[in-house]
Image (cartoon, rainbow, N blue to C red):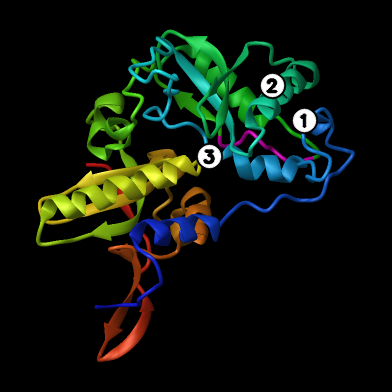
């Protein structure tokens, strides 16, 4: 396996990767009234329903619920289950989230919404539920997923998020993939997309590089994790439940396929790596769906 050199270090490589797949905002359509009051700068195009559908898939991870206070420390959060509707990551994400919250109330009657905010993103949530098996949670989630805007279902990827007990404001423990199981239980199938591998004779060097890469993706609004195996460290993006992964469909179904289109390759130490078959280049190493350990 050969690696293709790229200018800059691993951190810059991840930054270029993220920038290369920035969401493109569609043209504004007056039919999509939900976006009329969005607080955008005059020179910035206002998002339409299709662009909302693109943004909605970046819902808050249960391990990404904290917001750093100016003094740092631990920030206490929800002690109940809720439904994550959408995450907004543009510069004016707080104002956009507030305007969207108002529109959801007036247009759809969703009055039990609230916003959780970090320095780089705001997530719009709905409802308070006792547990994951709460019948009202299931009913509300199905109703929200089926909401339509001009024959589009912008909230089709909404899903339930568990209570948050507060995490360190530095964020590193929250990005550790090995901690995810404690939230969902051992019997819940979970998957994530591996997009980076770090290897070094000094394991601490590889571990630090993976942690920094995951933190960089998080700062760009991605649901990124690091995972330290016995011989190498990985960087992954996204969390998928069993009903979001179709092993019989091309690209493992729509949810995984969309993410793989944005992150098609698996970098080795911050560089795209080539695969050789029978002595010939067979393209770059693809990103890979993996089970959450």
Decide which of 238, 142 is in the foreground and name it. 238
Instruction: Name the residue that disc number 3 marks.
Output: 58
Displayed quadrant of residue 287:
bottom left
User: Disc 1 or 2, which lies upstream in sequence?
Assistant: 1
Closer to the chain start, of discs 2 and 3, is: 3
Mark 3 vs mark 1, foreground winner is 1
Could you tell me which secondary element the residue under label 1 belongs to? Answer: loop
Residue at the spot of label 1: 39
* Dot 2 alpha-carbon crowd within 10 angstroms: few under 14, some 14 to 19, many 20 or more: some
Q: Residues within 10 Å of mark 3 (few under 14, many from 20)?
A: many
CA–CA distance in space, label 1 to label 2 = 9 Å
Q: Give the range drawn in magenta.
A: 151-157
Q: Mark 2 points at which residue?
A: 98
Residue found at the far bottom of this picture? 279
Judge whether residue 192 can be spotted in this image: no
**Where residue 42 sits in the image (x, y, percent)?**
84, 40
**Residues at circles 2 and 3 in contact by the CB criterion of under 8 Å:** no
> Seen in the image, is 31 located left or right of residue 48?
right
């Amino acid at each position: 396996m050969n690696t293709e050199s790229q200018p800059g270090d691993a951190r810059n490589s991840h930054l270029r990767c993220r920038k290369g797949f920035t969401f493109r905002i569609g043209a504004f359509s007056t039919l999509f009234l939900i976006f009329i009051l969005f607080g955008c700068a005059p020179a910035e195009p206002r998002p339409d329903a299709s662009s909302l559908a693109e943004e909605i898939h970046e819902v808050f991870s249960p391990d990404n619920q904290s917001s750093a206070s100016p003094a740092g420390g631990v920030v206490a959060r929800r002690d109940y289950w809720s439904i994550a509707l959408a995450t907004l990551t543009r510069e004016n994400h707080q104002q956009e989230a507030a305007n969207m919250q108002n529109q959801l109330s007036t247009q759809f009657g969703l009055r039990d919404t609230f916003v959780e905010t970090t320095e780089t993103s705001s997530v719009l949530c709905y409802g308070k539920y006792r547990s994951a098996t709460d019948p009202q949670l299931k009913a509300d989630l199905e109703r929200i997923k089926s909401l339509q805007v001009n024959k589009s279902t912008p909230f089709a990827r909404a899903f339930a998020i568990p209570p948050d007990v507060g995490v360190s404001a530095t964020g590193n423990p929250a990005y550790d993939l090995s901690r995810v199981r404690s939230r969902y239980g051992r019997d819940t199938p979970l998957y994530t997309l591996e997009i980076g591998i770090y290897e070094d004779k000094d394991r601490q060097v590889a571990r630090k590089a993976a942690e920094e890469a995951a933190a960089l993706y998080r700062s760009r609004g991605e649901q990124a994790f690091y995972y330290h195996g016995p011989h190498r460290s990985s960087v992954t993006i996204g969390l998928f439940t069993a009903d979001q992964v179709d092993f019989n469909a091309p690209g493992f179904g729509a949810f995984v396929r969309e993410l793989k289109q944005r992150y098609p390759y698996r970098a080795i130490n911050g560089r795209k790596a080539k695969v050789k078959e029978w002595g010939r280049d067979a393209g770059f190493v693809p990103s890979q769906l993996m089970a959450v350990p």
